[in-house]
Amino acid sequence: MKLKRRWLVPASLVAVAATTGALVAASTGGASSEKASGSITVWVDAVRLPVAKLYVKTHPKVKVNVVTYDGDGNGATTMQTKIQLWNRTGKGWPDVVFSEQANDPVWMAQPPFDFALNLKGVFPASLLKGWPAPSLAQCTVNGRLVCLQDNLAQEVLYVNKKLMGQFGYKVPTTWQQWAALGAKVAKEHPGYIIGNMGESFSHWLYLWPDRCPISQVVAPKTVRINSADVHCTRMATLLDPLIKSGVVPPESVFTPAFAQKYGGDNDKILLMPGPTWYAKDIFGGTLKVPAGEMTAALPLRWKNEAPTTGQVGGGPWIVSKHTKNVAAAIDFVKFATTSRAVKSKPGALSPGFPSYGPVATMWLKSLNKDTYFAAPPGAAMKAAAGLVWKGWSMVTYPDQPIWSTSVVTQLVAGKALSDQLPALGEGLSNNAKAAGYKVVNK
Amino acid sequence: MEATRTRGLHIPRGLPFVLPYLPFLIVFGIAPTIYALELAVTNVDGSWAGVDNFTRTYDDFRFIPAFKHILVYTVVWLGALMVFVVGLALLLHGRANRVSATYRFLFYIPGALAGAAAVVIWLFMLDPTVSPGAFLLRDLLGASIFAQSIAPGNLPYIFAMIAFWTGAGGWIVVMYGALNTIPPDLEEAARIDGAGPFTIAFRLKLPLIRKWIAYMLILSFALGTQLFVEPEIVQHASFGLVSDTWSTNQLAYQLAFRYADFNGAAAIAVDLLMIGLLGAVVIVTRSGLFRAED
Amino acid sequence: MGIRLLGLGARMAILLVFAIFFIAPVLWLILAPTKSDNALVTSSPFSFGSFHNVAQAWNHLDAYSDHLYRRWIANTLIYSLSATAITLAISIPAGYGLALGKFWGRKLILTLTLVVMIMPAASLVLPIFLELNALHLIGSVFSVILPFSFFPFGIYLAYIYYATSIPSELLDAARVDGCGEWLTFRRVALPLAKPVVALVFFFSFVANWNNFFLPYVVLADSNQYPITVGLSNLLASTPSFNPAVGGGGQSVNIFKPELALATLLAVIPVAIVFLLSQRALVRGTLGGAVKQ
């Protein structure tokens, strides 16, 4: 008896020391889950709801009111409407908001909305180091860090390894090789495609990687929009014959027609530039491409130039300036973006490539093991993460609708992309000016 | 008699019945309208703006296109209502029997669908890969994919068709009910005099439901200019192939809530109000809608 | 005789074509949940799939955000029925008073009602929101029910009905009998009101059920949404309609069959109301009352 109890004292001392050490480590520069309490209101979209529910389950000390909304996706005006009304009544703001629109934090950080909290100094600095620089830059408005990206959506080149091998084609590494291959495919295997142009975000997949300056903030409230720039025109010239011959059709992967024509049994997708979140959800789920065929390769680059790629989304988490419970709000965002419980495996809790580096590595490891793919796609995704071109800035107005109405509708009618660039530039300029920006060409 | 004579108190006839309605009219109708009118002629800080908001919104690059869209849409829709709704109601009333009741029921069913629901259905109907009317889409619109069905030139007609699909049934019910208030003796008398079905329909019945048709036209004209839900939802569902400022009401909404420009939004609202009122005045005076005697 | 048959044939043909136009999409909607997402694209539009697919679609729909769909339907029923009850209570008497009364301001009220009806909703929503906030109603169901109760269309229906279908002989008869205003209304106008009550009930209920704009702006909590706002929320959450989610939405399990089912179920209460109103509408004709 006496012997047993004697080791208890040093053991408990060690335990206390360990706990204190853990507490100290966890609380570097910010709130820890031990300290988070009280109540918060969180607005999430349906896809992020499981994350919110897991937080509620694992943090009984915090009372969380979870509200699901449409996520403000596709250029919606939901959040602007709500924030304006809350501002007018002086109450009602949620503490944490998840948005599907990557440019939401930009207007949220500025008057008249003035909604977003500056996370620098509030969010643990040691954790912030885990986000790639382009991602943090995207969330920085006027020097303030107003959001944190939930997942990275960098663009890679998806490859149907089986078909490419079958036809004896080599995987292209440059846009020029890709275009040449397209010309070949049109002749040798008509009906097969190497990409598509009909998305509301196709300009992010084809113009952004080539550094086309149509959304470049060069000074506060000044945006550079020059659709006649060589980086835009040369890409359009490259794409025109491919669109015309049908190897890059102006259709969207999210339409039933697309899946019917190119997916499933038809299996006509040879290559496709796309974001990381296409991986299994789109190819396996939406398009029903058979298993054992797809993989990902490094994004295409312009011949003899440094590689840059585009990005499609990557939802921001925003904390409200008006929150009365900063500790719990930060804790929630921390949980959603960095915790292993949420982010370590692809699935309902973490469908996209995590922004936070350490968990991204785990996520990739798990993705690479998925037998759906012909070869592990993770390496290409990881390499592409740091290649997103920083010159495409987030602005207060969404550019997807402008691309859709001024370009896609014309492509569908059979016109050439090069001919639509002036209209695209004009549409973007008009919207920029209406949003209070000064528009410059250089 | 000008008023009912109760003991010493002259209560204007009919007024007590209207009193419960008045608070609602004021709180949810008149006060907001006055506030909106005030917003249209003032600036954000409350100072007088005169016609500044009107000229500013007129110069907006989306203003004229939106009004053009609405014009075409309204003309097509009103035309369809006048011809088809009145025509179908007369057709059904001509032989009022169980068959006619069944048809009335069938025509009404789409009216049961919420604005959002109706658009969801038509998104599928306009998609050649899913729609039972794919052959019509190919022949009439030359469309083999959804994006072609909703090409910009087709939009006013498509929205008019959706509005007709959901709204016609209800108006047919109203017109049919109106036709039912015509004393059957009149019809009998006309038939005995040798009038054929066309004569009865157009010379007898049509004039007697004048007030109802006028009401339908006024309301449809006003509602036409207020088109919002259909283009808004098609905009979301088509990934933005339809602009979020396609209709005038959408533009007002965007000005108010995206740009926090409530004064500009109010100016557009007043523009629409003026147009609607013009139409209403014309129709009211020409049909005697407000005359209490009949 | 030949012309008669031709006329009959033409009438039938016209009615049939329109019936197809109105019904075919609804028929498609009814059959859609019986098919899987893939089958909707590949098989015939009017084919019947299986009940199993319907059950699966319902499970997905019900699982969306913790049975949110059920709450939406319940909310819409509460909002619509409450508001319609208030609307009937104020509109029928008001229509009567406006049609058959003579008081200063009668035409003014009619005109103002018309003007308000023509004013675009987008511009009225903010003032109404501010008013509701001043009355501390934001967040309560009354922030929706009270504005819904203001139904100028119903006022006009009642007004036109009473203006056109009550012959003055009936009213004079009642007054000769010594009835005061209230008794006249109860004895003459109210019993004859069945058709217009059915009409107003029906239009008010449907308008409330279908109203999108006001609840969209005024309600913050998705648990309070009516089904219209809910449907557009659902639409925005499906991968098919909202691609740039930045991380797939396949786990949400809302695809075409679920959307179709959600739409279909949202229609049923309104269809029931229509059936009920339909009988009253057909029954009420004026001729009998005058002969009495």
Image (cartoon, rainbow, N blue to C red):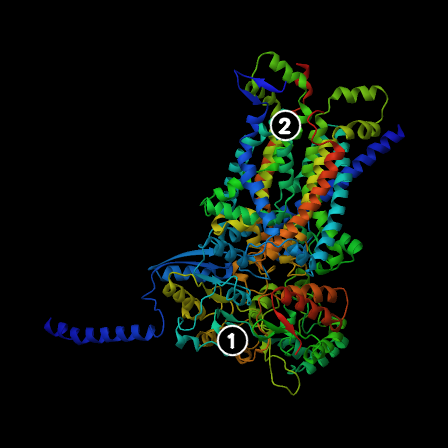
Q: How far separated are the C-alphas under marks 2 and 1? A: 66 Å
Q: Nearer the viewer, residue C54 or B42?
A: B42
Q: Secondary structure at mark 2?
A: helix
Counting from the top left corner in percent of width and height, residue C161 is at: 66, 28
Q: Residues within 10 Å of mark 1 (few under 14, many from 20)?
A: some
Quarter of the figure with the C terminus of chain B: top right
Q: Chain of mark 1?
A: A
Whether callout 2 and callout 1 share a subunit is answered no
Counting from the top left corner in percent of width and height, residue B65 is at: 72, 57
Q: Nearer the viewer, residue B218 or A194?
A: B218
Q: Is residue C242 above or below residue C128?
A: below
Residue assigned mark 2:
C195
Disc 1 residue type (three-letter) = Ala
Furthest toward the left, the residue is: A2
Q: Nearer the viewer, residue C141 or A130?
A: C141
Q: Is residue A128 above or below residue C289?
A: below
Q: Nearer the viewer, residue B259 or B39?
A: B39
Q: Chain of mark 2?
A: C
Closer mark to the observer between disc 2 and disc 1: 1
Report the disc number at residue A137: 1
Q: Is residue B95 above or below residue A255?
A: above
Q: Quadrant of residue B277?
A: top right
- Count the numbered circles shown: 2
Q: Residues within 10 Å of mark 2 (few under 14, many from 20)?
A: many
Q: Work out whether residue C67 can be spotted.
A: no
Q: Secondary structure at mark 1?
A: helix
Quarter of the figure with the N terminus of chain B: top right
Q: Is residue A139 above or below residue C21?
A: below
Disc 2 residue type (three-letter) = Pro
Counting from the top left corner in percent of width and height, residue A91 is at: 44, 54
